[in-house]
Amino acid sequence: MKKIEAIIRPSKLKAIQQGLKDVDIPCLTVLPASGTGLQKSFTKIYRGTEQSLTLQQRTMIMCVVSDENLDKCVNVILKFGSDGEVGDGKIFIYNVEDAIRMSTGVRGHEAIH
């Protein structure tokens, strides 16, 4: 099993979510995030005052998938989440040792389906 964490532009969330559903990966967790990467800071006018902001608003999505679904999941995130520009985000992939469905106690591969 693998855990995929993707930091994406908030505007890309719906397309990625639908794309994952279409390839039978409907389960994901979504968190608001902010951070900075290679893109420069930007200027925003707030209540008439110009402010320089370095933290960009992003969304983090997390999925735990079987090894067989890893490439499908990553490809969907890349297809629907990237414009090919700096600031599109990052994808991180981790090994997952075990998973337990709390309602039934089922473990391992069956817990993520």
Image (spheres, grey):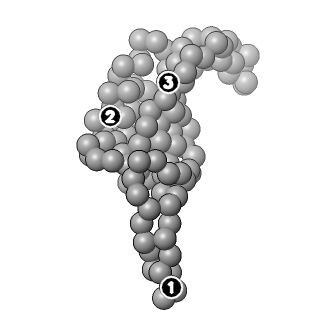
Q: Position of residue 64 (x, y in %)?
A: 54, 24
Q: Position of residue 63 (x, y in %)?
A: 51, 29
Q: Residue at x 50, y 39 (%)?
A: 61
Q: Quadrant of residue 90?
A: top left
What label sits on residue 93 in the rendered view?
A: 3
Q: Quadrant of residue 18?
A: top left
Type of residue at label 3? Ile
Where 102 sits versus 60, above or below?
Answer: above
Which mark sits nearer the N-terminus, 1 or 2? 1
Type of residue at label 1? Thr
Which mark sits nearer the N-terminus, 3 or 2? 2
Q: Which residue is mark 1?
A: 49
Determine whether the residue tagged by mark 2 lies in a helix, strand or loop. helix
Residues packed near mark 2 inside 10 Å, few (<14), some (14 to 19) or many (20 plus): some
In depth, the one of 32 and 103 nearer the eye is 32
What separation in Å lies between label 3 and label 2 (alpha carbons)?
A: 13 Å
Q: How many marks?
A: 3
Q: Residue at x 41, y 43 (%)?
A: 89
Q: Which residue is mark 2?
A: 78
